[in-house]
Amino acid sequence: MAVEEKYLDKLAGPVAEAGKCLLFLFRMLLGIRFSGSQILTVLQQTYLIGARSLVIIMICGFFVGMVLSLQAINALEQFGASDQVSLLVGKSLFRELGPVLTALLFAGRAGTSVTAEIGLMKATNQIEAMELMAIDPIQRIALPRFVAGVISVPLLTAMFNALAILGSVVFSIGVMDLDAGIFWSKLQTGVYFGKDFVGGLWKSVVFGGTISLVAVYFGYSARPTGAGVGTATTNTVVLSSVLVLIFDFIMTSFLT
Amino acid sequence: MEDSKAKVRRSDTPLIRIRDLVFRRGRTTILDGVSMDIPKGSIVAFMGPSGVGKTTILRLISGQLRPDEGTIEIGGKIISSMSYAELKRFRRNFGVLLQDGALFTDLTVFENIATPVREHTNLPEPLIRRLVMSKLSAVGLGGIEEKMPHELSGGMARRVAFARAVVLDPAIMLYDEPMTGLDPIAVSTVRTLMRETNDALGLTSIVVTHNVNQMRELVDYCYIIVAAKIAGEGPPEELTASTEAGVNQFMNGRVEGPIPFHYKPPGAPWGLLD
Ligand SMILES: Nc1ncnc2c1ncn2[C@@H]1O[C@H](COP(=O)(O)OP(=O)(O)O)[C@@H](O)[C@H]1O
Ligand SMILES: [Mg+2]
């Protein structure tokens, strides 16, 4: 077994790993029961994971909104069009920056902690103890964290967007003295709820799923040592960030 | 107790019967033709140097690993031919105390002990509470149910893990190095718990350990495993006096003897090219 595995890993390491990861996803999805206790653990995890990322998401959202407005006004001023700033900020934010930046922050904040948590559970024999109690650890540990990620990322994205708009309001109206009425009416008429805002949220659902799957899978397959858990945590950030950007391009080019 | 020991040893229908067990990992043969009979009601120790495959035997008995050859029969059922679902049901008969306790770090003491109950029964909440609290006070730790595992001392954590292992009243207890890292008082506490629970509930216990001294007073029968085979077996007093070289070296902790100081890679010299 070990010999074949070694060759497989060398010849087609990434492909084999992706396959194992997908199998892991199916095993998780097979564990969905909609039972009271399962829903409760999912909500608990959503709270833990979401709350852990909320502050950083809000701070970053606010400053991204400010800097976007600053750059937009700088550029638009040259054409005397600085009253279009809310349109530019809204579109770029809802379609791209909101979902992508939230996903990257989520990967760094929550993804890593999920990987580390599961990896440490493995290193301290907790996963094995569950198997011995005839409890499926994939259903009990991995599934709730995965679903919680799928739920929290869109919510966090909406939060990021809201704070970014607030940042834009503060900078454009508060600092640059643009007209508040024009700012809001441009945003309302130029930025579409369905295509721009909801379209972005769909992306963030996919990002949430991708990051959470990578995080639970790497945690679950980590070597059960301190170094192994460290490596797995780093791998989670690297791989999930790369995947988010790749999937972003694919989805954007097909869906718009 | 002398009496019950003698009875146990004569019992001719062992609860666990292992025959010609062979287990390999790659080219390394971890266990090579191991046979044992473990009578109901006894406490049996598997002893041997670290890395010899003691934990591996426990995993084979609990069905986490499948033997390459040979059979493991528990209460007349052959473990290796069970389906996954059967095995899952069968595991309710086992209470397992792993190295370091393996408490769930994200749950309170109460929830840790309640986890197997919730998973395998439909008891109403008040009954679960009564059951958990009775097990907790049986290990002398009533009142700590709302603490988190990281707030406990090593000995307390081990006792909570013990309560969790016995909460469903298993028939067989498996202990993997149950006393590692405990202070002498905690060692005695755990040892007393193991003996008393075993005798009071009529369990059968298997203890895996490399610590000879901690086992002398506890176990009824020992198997010493050296180099993939059983090098000696018998009650601890007899083994200490054994003249068989490997057993003698291990029981008395000597450097010289058949158990090598230098690691030998399997299939050397080709092993070096891996
Ligand atoms: N998952 C594994 N993969 C490969 N080798 C392993 C694995 N687990 C244990 N081993 C090897 O099997 C041998 C026996 O291990 P183990 O049963 O844990 O020993 P013990 O419990 O007696 O210290 C050791 O040499 C160890 O290196
Ligand atoms: Mg071991």
Image (spheres, helix red, strand yellow):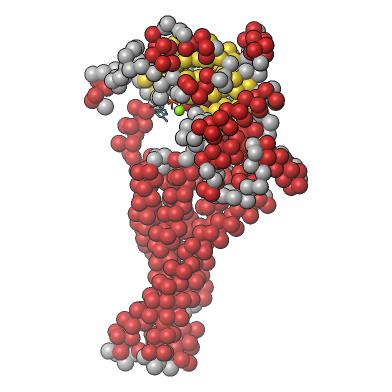
In the rendered view, would you say B215 is above or below A47? above
- One can see residue B189 in this view: yes
Residue A34 at x, y = what percent?
65, 51
Question: Image quadrant of residue A19?
Answer: top left
Q: Is residue B225 left or right of residue B96?
A: left
**Residue furthest out toward the top:** B243
Pick the residue in front: A40 or B197. B197
In the rendered view, would you say A220 is above or below B94? below
Residue A217 at x, y = what percent?
45, 46
Numbered label tally: 0
Q: Residue at x 42, y 46 (%)?
A: A218
Residue A140 at x, y = what percent?
57, 45
Q: Residue at x 45, y 7 (%)?
A: B242
Q: Residue at x 38, y 89 (%)?
A: A175
Q: Is residue A174 left or right of residue A46?
A: left
Looking at the figure, which quarter contains the C terminus of chain A? bottom left
Q: Is residue B66 left or right of residue B126?
A: left
Residue A241 at x, y = what percent?
37, 58
Question: Image quadrant of residue B121?
Answer: top right
Q: Residue at x 66, y 28 (%)?
A: B197
Quadrant of the displayed image that contains ligand 2 = top left
Pick the residue in front: B154 or B222. B154
- One can see residue B116 in this view: no
Looking at the figure, which quarter contains the N terminus of chain A? top left
